[in-house]
């Protein structure tokens, strides 16, 4: 004798509990920790992370050590031992900018972002997890590279250095990491790898080049001086103590933090307003 089939209204949903039946499948509420675990798996699994961070380490440590071998003890009387890392960071920051864009734009390019948002419908949680994981990775790698160069430079020059350099490790790593986070936010808003990378390179390079032309005009001289003071290379130079007038670089770091925060807000707003 055949068993009558249940109608759709009589079928029990997965995980539901009715009289006489309890689903064996555990039900767990998702939270930010799940999104963080997912984004960590992604960022450590893709080749772009290995290549960009590998090139970053080669540039910062390699160029830093090349510069350090050309220095003498008396060169570090007023500057920290991490100064050689500055020359590598000027180029290395482009690697973090590129990786920041690719962390999110690559998913839009391949269409995998649909799968991501299907698995985690709360889009703001996905973007927050990407920002947190990327910043943590970028900061740790940057701090390691700068600190490693500082330690090796100090071992090469046993005398003359009397300036603490721990702060430059933290501030230098924070600055380039924020640049990468800004790139991630721009990538989220533009959703296109080439466009976002081009926009970020323009944001970094144009303020470093344009002042040379603006300073030729008296009416534009004030703008040129401000742009010269706050562009990325000069900001890093101030952080590493290469500018005697304002060696701390706190104002430049604060400006970058403000711009990055505004970009993150814009990314969250557009994420909820636009379709995938």
Image (tube, grey):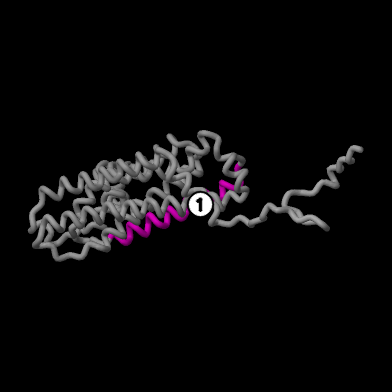
The residue located at (45%, 52%) in the rendering is: 133
Q: Nearer the viewer, residue 224 or 191?
A: 191
Q: Pointer 1: what residue? A: 37
Part of the protein shown in magenta: 249-274
Question: Can you give x and y, in whole percent of width and height, for residue 268 in the image?
Answer: 54, 51
The residue located at (33%, 60%) in the rendering is: 251
47 relative position to 127: left or right: left
Where does the N terminus fall, quadrant-wise? top right
Q: Is residue 258 magenta?
A: yes
- Helix, strand or loop status at disc 1: helix
Question: Can you give x and y, in whole percent of width and height, for residue 194 in the image?
Answer: 43, 34
Q: Is residue 107 above or below residue 31?
A: above
47 relative position to 143: left or right: right
Question: Can you give x and y, in whole percent of width and height, for residue 152 in the image?
Answer: 18, 54
The residue located at (30%, 47%) in the rendering is: 220
Question: Can you give x and y, in whole percent of width and height, for residue 17 in the image?
Answer: 77, 56
Where does the C terminus fall, quadrant-wise? top right
């Amino acid at each position: 004798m055949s068993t009558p089939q249940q109608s759709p209204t009589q079928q029990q949903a997965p995980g539901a509990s009715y009289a006489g039946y309890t689903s064996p499948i555990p039900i767990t509420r998702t939270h930010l920790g799940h999104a963080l675990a997912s984004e960590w798996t992604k960022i450590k699994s893709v080749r772009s992370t290995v290549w960009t961070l590998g090139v970053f380490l080669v540039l910062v440590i390699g160029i830093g050590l090349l510069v350090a071998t050309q220095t003498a003890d008396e060169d570090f009387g007023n500057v920290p031992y991490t100064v050689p890392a500055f020359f590598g960071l000027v180029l290395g920051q482009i690697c973090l900018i590129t990786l920041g864009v690719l962390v999110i734009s690559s998913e839009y390019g391949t269409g995998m972002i649909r799968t991501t948002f299907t698995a985690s419908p709360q889009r703001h949680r996905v973007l927050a997890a990407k920002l947190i994981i990327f910043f943590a990775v970028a900061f740790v790698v940057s701090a390691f590279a700068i600190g490693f160069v500082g330690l090796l430079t100090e071992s090469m020059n046993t005398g003359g250095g009397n300036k603490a350099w721990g702060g430059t490790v933290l501030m230098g790593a924070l600055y380039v990491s924020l640049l990468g986070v800004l790139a991630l936010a721009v990538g989220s808003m533009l959703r296109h790898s080439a466009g976002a990378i081009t926009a970020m390179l323009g944001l970094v390079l144009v303020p470093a080049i344009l002042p040379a032309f603006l300073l030729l005009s008296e009416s534009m001289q004030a703008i040129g001086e401000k742009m010269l003071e706050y562009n990325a290379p000069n900001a890093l130079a101030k952080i590493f103590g290469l500018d005697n007038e304002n060696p701390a670089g706190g104002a430049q770091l604060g400006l970058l933090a403000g711009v990055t925060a505004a970009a993150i807000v814009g990314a969250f707003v557009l994420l909820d307003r636009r379709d995938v």
